[in-house]
Amino acid sequence: MTRVLVVAANGAFFAVPMASVHQVLRHPMVTRVPLAPPGLLGVVNVRGEIVPLLDTGVLTGTGSLSEPPFAVLVSGEKDMVAMAAEELPIAADFEEPVGPGTQPGELGVYSSGGRLVVLVDIEELVKNQLDLKRAS
């Protein structure tokens, strides 16, 4: 069983392993970054640490989020990042996937609370977005 945090973006649901989650921010104060790539909404100050706020919609291909009311702080291999969320994220337990992920960074599709949720590797999503940006 895998404990996850489910994040909503543009009517779709994505999950990150709870082991990588630090906290959920309500109404994060976002500082926009000039000429930032589409996957970066800006940065947020978390107890003196500047953390990039990623546009979960852009990273997952569901469309851009404009003013997300929540952000989920997750740690990666090297640094902490924040993922934008349209609704208060909820905890869930995943058993077996109902299907494989179809895009880079998708680890599997699970059924949770009557909806399909895609378990994602946030670092792989960011890497994929950067690779797409370089290719264009």
Image (cartoon, rainbow, N blue to C red):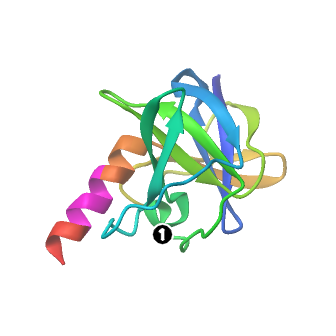
Quarter of the image for residue 73 reads top right
Magenta-span inclusion, residue 61: no
Q: Name the residue under label 1.
A: 61
**Residue 67 coordinates in the image, percent (x, y):** 65, 65
Above or below 47: residue 38: below
How far from the left and from the top, in percent, is residue 43? 45, 49
Position above or below: 34 against 113: below
Task: Report the span colored magenta.
Answer: 127-132
Query: What percent of the width, then of the height, locates residue 81?
Result: 44, 39
Q: Is residue 68 shown left or right of residue 100?
A: right
Residue 111 visible to the viewer: yes
Outermost residue, left side: 135
Residue drawn at point x = 45 percent, y = 56 percent: 42
For label 1, the SS is loop
Asked if residue 44 is positioned above or below residue 40 in the image, the reply reads above
Does the image show residue 119? no
Q: Nearer the viewer, residue 99 or 7?
A: 7
Q: In this view, does 74 lie to the left or right of 125?
A: right
Q: Which of 14 and 52 is in front in this view?
A: 52
Place of residue 17 in the rendered image (x, y in percent of width and height, measured from the top left): 56, 30
User: Is 36 situated left or right of 28 in this image?
Assistant: left
Q: In which quarter of the image is residue 103?
A: bottom left
Left or right, residue 61 beside residue 72:
left
- Most common secondary structure along the magenta stretch: helix
Residue at point 29%, 57% (across, down): 128
Disc 1 crowd, CA 10 A, few/some/many (<14, 14-19, 20+):
some
Between 113 and 42, the one lying in front of the other is 42
Question: Which corner quadrant holds the N terminus?
Answer: top right
Residue drawn at (25%, 59%) of the image = 130
